[in-house]
Image: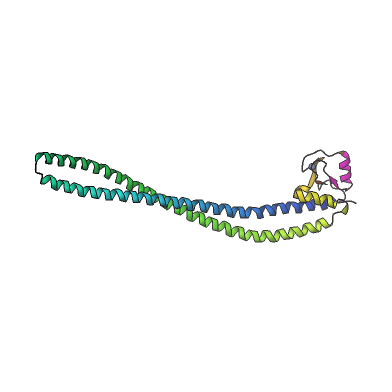
Amino acid sequence: MSITGTELRDLHRIHKQLTDLRGRLDRGPKQVAASAGAVRRMEMDAEQAKETHQKARVASDGKQLQLRSREAKLEDLKVKLNIANSNKEFQAFKEQIAADQQANLVLEDEILESLERIDQLAEKVNKSETDLAAARSEADKVKARVEGEQANLDSELAGVLSELKVAEANLPLEFKSNYDRVARVRGEEALAEVDGEVCGGCYQMLTPNMMNELYMSRAVFCKSCGALLYLSESRGVGD
Ligand SMILES: [Zn+2]
């Protein structure tokens, strides 16, 4: 029972195509998931930026309220100063006014700083929203592209699988079960082209006897990796 290098080379090509198609079918959904993940991260970033901005605004508003009430208190003190009954009272109000004015200056500085920070945080919010919009549109594009590709890949895969069925049906029964077992586990690595006198799958040196068998178009499995071997096109005999 013989099997030509051409048949085996063709079978190997089919297996390689299957590996490639399955890899692409597998990659598509991963790319979709990765871009959706990026969108989720940016949604969280945008949410976080908004929250930080909002908190800073609330804190700043609080300080501004505090300043207004302190200023009102200061006006009261000035009125009291003007109607002080004694020099001692007058001095006490004067000192308190000076202290309060100092405290208000500090608070005003804090408010100015907080307003600057709010501006910076607003910029961050804008940037995170721009980034998010870009990520969303990228994710939509990836999804549309992958969905388009998957349909084509599915039909290509179906075509190659039926090619495989035909090619496998032509294999001699004697070693078909052996081949089936290896193919199930190893896919495209179930076959290997002989490179010089070496297995192209695992680079194990082949024996002269194995080479002779190959030249006689007999089925030869690599003793090291188990691949079904075939000669390169230029050396094939019986093709
Ligand atoms: Zn090998």
Task: Give the quarter the ligand 1 occupies.
Answer: top right
Q: Give the range drawn in magenta.
A: 208-221
Count of marks, rendered view? 0
Q: Which residue is drawn at 55% across and 58% down?
A: 141
> Where's residue 193, x and y in %?
79, 46
> Where's residue 182, x and y in %?
79, 48
Q: Can residue 25 be seen in this view?
A: yes
The reply, left or right, for residue 14 in relation to residue 172 is: left
40 or 126, which lies in front? 40
Q: Residue at x 70, y 61 (%)?
A: 155
> Where's residue 223, x and y in %?
83, 41
Q: Is residue 231 visible?
A: no
The reply, left or right, for residue 130 in relation to residue 219 is: left
Q: Residue at x 79, y 46 (%)?
A: 192
Question: Magenta segment: does it hold 217?
Answer: yes
65 or 120, which lies in front? 65
The reply, left or right, for residue 55 in relation to residue 188 is: left
On the image, which quarter does residue 204 sit in? top right
Q: How is the image coloured?
A: rainbow
Question: Magenta segment: does it hold 46?
Answer: no
